[in-house]
Amino acid sequence: MILGKVIGTVWGAKQSRNLSGRRVVEVRPVRLKGLCPGSRLGNDPDDEQLGPGSLLAVDPLGADTGQTVLVSIGSRVRDLVAGPDVPTKHCVVAIVDEASVDTE
Amino acid sequence: MILGRVIGQVWATRKNPRLEGQKLLLVRPLAWHRPDHETDHLVAVDPVGAEVGQDVVVCLGMPARRELGDVRFPVEASVAAIVDQVEIYQDPGSVTAFRFARGREPVDLIERPA
Amino acid sequence: MIRARVIGEVWTTRKAPRFASDKWLLVAEIVPDRQGTGIRTTGRVVVATDRLDAGVGDEVIVSFGSGARNAVDPGNRDVLVDAAVVQVIDGTSTNESP
């Protein structure tokens, strides 16, 4: 699982049947490099705390843009969280209140 | 499995019900292990009781769920053990000699000649 | 499966119960170098369960996921292993190593 910030949602009329009705969010993974020990990742991390890439995840919890989420990766977790027919490998499994970064 | 350092903890109120009561640790891998996405961290469930600053072995995939006692846990990383010591055998002339990056060495690292 | 070299060992006492008897090796992935005459490391380092008594410096094959479990105890889904040494390499026809 990885931490990331929801930067928006994605939608479209043409989609796989098994994706219909699913909320899809775009997530930028958090980058710890450069964070000072003792810092906190709150509900809306700064852009400097984010890495360069992004990923798309199915979000059954309804995370809002700006929130930090825990994204689980893999087909088995997808089966459990979203359903076995859903065409994704990334699922939001928690909306993070706070994460501590206590040591380098 | 991978080697990592516990650098923090994660708290969440809104979460998948099966994550209720699970301790989530923020772990920084000590060596590259080809993650699905290029990130410098991962979050692992901790059934062992690791603390910030300790090195751990993190198990990935199906065994990470089995370790927790229920394959229906929606996680793919869990702490399998707390590391006492890492022993590396160095053969300086070898093209395959390995060194941890600076700042990424295990807390208790012993280097021996091969 | 990947080719890897055993570079060390990880010692633990506080393990999750079902990992208790495992011997854990630190292995570094190796691939043929650009000339195809030797080998080089990729920088990828993982911890692998070893039931074959591989030694430090040995070149080995490491399997992941269900393949790793099949190597350790086929059919037993209660065995906890996500990476395992499945062969100690004595020779290859791709280059001189080991």
Image (cartoon, coloured by chain):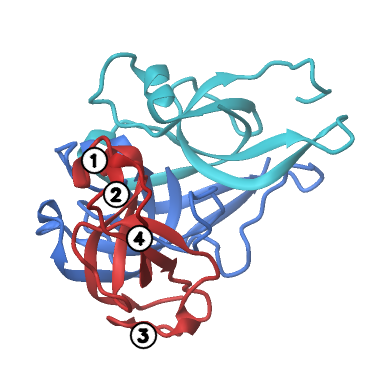
Q: Name the residue that disc number 4 marks.
A: A11
Of badges 4 and 3, nearer the viewer stands 4
Position above or below: B99 against B9: above
Above/below status of B5 relative to C80: below
Element on which disc 2 rests:
strand
* Residue drawn where x is 24% and y is 69% of the image: A63
Rendered hue of chain A is red
Q: Are marks 4 and 1 in contact (CB under 8 Å)?
A: no
The disc at residue A18 is none
Q: Which residue is mark 2?
A: B78
Disc 2 from disc 1: Cα separation: 7 Å
Q: Mark 2 Cα within 10 Å, few/some/many (few <14, many 20+)?
A: many
Asked whether, in this view, residue C26 is left or right of residue B94, the answer is left
Q: Amino acid at mark 3?
A: Gly
Q: Tell me the chain of label 2.
A: B
Q: Disc 3 to disc 1, how far (Cα)?
A: 30 Å
| Colour that chain C carries in the picture | cyan
